[in-house]
């Protein structure tokens, strides 16, 4: 938190040195039997579910300023955590997710997809819609395999 606010880190929070951290080996071996799971993150049940290819028309402006349309081709997958309540609703609602994604994509302009900011905005909007349709926080990430504007 101190990195974000620019404040000083209280002494109690400043990188505590414990026996668990000091004895951790970089060899990649898991926790020993005597550790009782300390320092080990709970196991997530991550599922990646791909969607069929999405092709929609988007608005564009030519160099002369004329309005035109372009094709947007998108291959994506949704990453979600099965351990989160409501994750069981994702697969049955997959068609509704796809419909919501297409509805959003049709509203885009070619300029909306330019650069890394455009990609980040696209992924965050699709993730927001996935969480709304599934009515849970199970969707964790949108993975984009192909994004082509023609």
Image: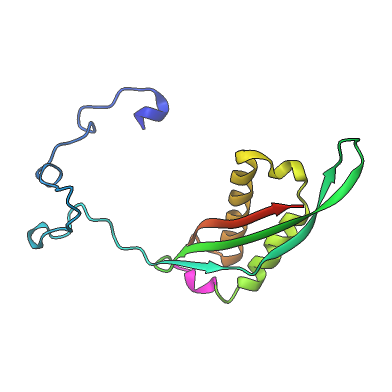
Q: Residue at x 49, y 62 (%)?
A: 79
Asked if residue 89 lies in the magenta stretch, the reply is yes
- Position above or below: 148 against 2: below
Asked if residue 111 lies in the magenta stretch, the reply is no
Residue 72, how many percent across, how many down? 74, 55
Q: Residue at x 59, y 61 (%)?
A: 76
Q: Residue at x 64, y 66 (%)?
A: 97
Q: Quick check: 148 left or right of 131? A: right
Q: Quadrant of residue 17?
A: top left
Q: Residue at x 58, y 58 (%)?
A: 145
Q: Quick check: 70 left or right of 122? A: right
Residue at the limit of the structure toward the left, as seen here: 34
**146 and 95: which is toward the camera:** 146
Q: Quadrant of residue 91?
A: bottom right
Residue 136, how many percent across, how many down? 51, 63
Residue 34, how many percent across, how many down? 7, 59
Residue at the limit of the structure toward the top, as seen here: 7
Magenta-drawn segment = 85-90
**95 and 8: which is toward the camera:** 95
Q: How many marks can you see?
A: 0
Residue 98, how many percent across, how many down? 66, 67
Q: Which corner quadrant holds the N terminus?
A: top left
Q: Quick check: 123 left or right of 85? A: right
Q: How is the image coloured?
A: rainbow
């Amino acid at each position: 938190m101190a990195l974000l606010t620019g404040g000083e880190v209280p002494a109690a929070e400043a990188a505590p040195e414990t026996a668990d951290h000091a004895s951790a080996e970089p060899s990649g071996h898991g926790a020993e039997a005597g550790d009782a799971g300390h320092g080990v993150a709970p196991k997530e049940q991550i599922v990646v579910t791909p969607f069929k290819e999405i092709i929609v028309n988007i608005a564009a402006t030519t160099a002369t300023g004329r309005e035109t349309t372009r094709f947007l081709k998108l291959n994506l997958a949704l990453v979600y955590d099965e351990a989160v309540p409501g994750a069981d609703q994702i697969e049955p609602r997959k068609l509704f997710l796809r419909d919501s994604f297409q509805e959003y994509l049709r509203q885009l302009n070619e300029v909306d997809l330019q650069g890394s900011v455009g990609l980040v905005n696209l992924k965050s909007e699709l993730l927001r819609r996935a969480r709304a349709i599934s009515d849970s926080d199970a969707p964790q990430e949108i993975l984009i395999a192909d994004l082509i504007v023609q």
